[in-house]
Amino acid sequence: MDFFSILTLFGGLAIFLFGMNVMGEGLEKCSGGRLKAILENLTSSPIKSVLLGAGVTAIIQSSSATTVMVVGFVNSGIMRLSQTIGIIMGANVGTTVTSWLLSLSGISSDNFFIRLLKPSSFAPVLACVGVVMTTFLKGERKHNIGSILIGFGVLMTGMELMSGSVKPLAEVPEFRNILILFSNPVLGVLTGALLTAVIQSSSASVGILQALAVTGGITYSNAIPIIMGQNIGTCVTAILSAIGANKNAKRTAVVHLSFNIIGTLVFLILYYSLNALLHFSFVTNSINAAGIALIHSIFNIFSTVLMLPFSRQLERLAMLIIPDDETQEKYDLLDERLLATPSVASHQAKSIADNMGMYCVDSFDLLQKLFAKFSTSSLESIRDNENTVDSYEDKLGTYLVKLSHESLTLDDSHMISTLLHTIGDFERISDHETNIAAAVEELHSKSMVFSAAAVRELNVLLSAVSEILMLTTNAFVKNDIEGAKGIEPLEQLIDKLTVKMKRHHIKRLKSGECSIESGFPFSDILTSCERIADHCSNIAVCIIQVSDDSFDTHEYLNQVKYEGENDFNEKYNMYKQKYRI
């Protein structure tokens, strides 16, 4: 093996890893936010968890990505530790799909149809089809499918380059002598673990082993401990990911490591014990790519079947290794580990923004009760909600900026644009609710009262603002375009209600029906209600405009007001009848 063969080997490895990355990204984009939904919708059935873990890993072609995602979910409080165990086991099974795909490179036959199954035959065709789809066809889904095909074609091309470059090693005695060392189970396991830890992908390290198998110098006795070590090495990614996470997230990484170490020890003890008794004839035979895929699958299925009944014991072991302390567990709702899967991260960010809207709705309900009957506990709850919304807005803004630099689907890009434009409005709504609460507190502390007419008008206004806030939050949570189009008529009515109420209040001041001192909190409440409605309008317009890839807010508002779009006048008149003062 000369210098240029070594260059070809590393070049093939680079192409192989790049192709795997491109294919994984394409698969992850095609699956979109469904990954989060799939992983969240778990039942108490361990078998279903295993199947889900295997399915998700087969989709995104990376057990490391699945495990890191799960660590992020646990750290965010989305999942419990017990829910993750089956997924981790299933992820190990799901990752074997890649090794079976790579084993196709070992097909050899003169039959035309069988030769078509060989990657060197169909990989270039798939890559060409992928290029056509990404270059000439429109539609994001077609582009994602094209990326998958290109990635698979590139991956297989890299595999062929690696296999071709190492074939001359079959004639090198020193290479055979090195491989003999790997028959030592400890050395083989350490080698496999180290290789996988370095490239942080068990699929890639198994692919490299399959490429080396073409030399004919690797036997089953060499390969088995290496494959065991590769499964241990893949745990490094999750362990690194858990650094700085909460205890349950760290325990998830410990479960992953414990599962693979225990599975490896049991498998090796059983294998070497049976070999000592039965003297397996295949041990000294050369192993091919399909044999490596088979051993990889047998081990992971064996480990899962062995350890699944002991899920609770694995959980207890993790809790013994990472014990509880007296400090309360904290959850990072916007875990940066999820940025590795942008579609999952964007949907998690959306769920946090949804919570901001629901906090605003909850605070306004408390405000209406506070206005009817003052309560210190309600006042504190409103302020606590405002602090929470402020915190969400600050963290979410930073998180979304980081997320916007990731590779995103069009839907995720639209979602992030909507969030960036609207979280500030929710934060301001929360501020105005606090202002109203402060005005009511001032009325209570100074024993001021409004006239019966003022109270009646304020109740009408508060009901109208409560409805627009609920409609806006529902439209935002459900991304309901039609619902968002119904916000503007009510916002216009609220504007006119506040103007009318100010005129009425001035008349009451002149007649002495209301005191000048009470006029200040009354004006503050009107102003804050009007501003809340304005921010609701901003959110609704953003939902509509982002869906149309447009941000011309003034043009849209003019259109709905003066051209009667979406039955503006009809809805306005309906609200006018409903909220009369």
Image: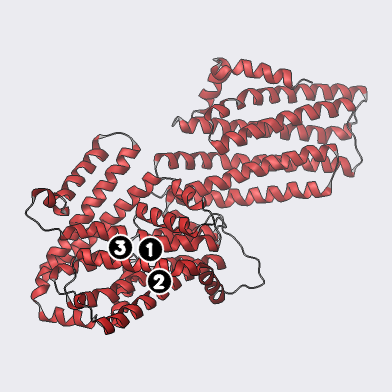
Query: Which residue sits at x=33%, y=64%?
Result: 201
Between the C-alphas of marks 3 and 1, the distance is: 10 Å
Q: Which mark lies nearer to you, 3 or 1?
A: 1
Is residue 343 found left or right of 388 in the rendered image? left
Disc 2 target residue: 260
Disc 2 + disc 1, Cβ < 8 Å: yes
Look at the numbered disc 3 and give the secondary structure of its residue.
Answer: helix
Amino acid beneath label 3: Ser
Q: Badge 2: few (under 14), some or many (20 or more) residues near its Cα, within 10 Å? A: many
Q: Badge 1: few (under 14), some or many (20 or more) residues near its Cα, within 10 Å? A: many
Between the C-alphas of marks 2 and 1, the distance is: 9 Å
Is residue 175 found left or right of 537 in the rendered image? left
Amino acid beneath label 1: Asn
Which circle's residue, 2 or 3, is located before the other in the chain? 3
530 or 191: nearer the viewer: 191
560 or 22: nearer the viewer: 22
Disc 3 target residue: 203
Is residue 238 found left or right of 570 in the rendered image? left
Which circle's residue, 2 or 1, is located before the other in the chain? 1
Look at the numbered disc 1 and give the secondary structure of its residue.
Answer: helix
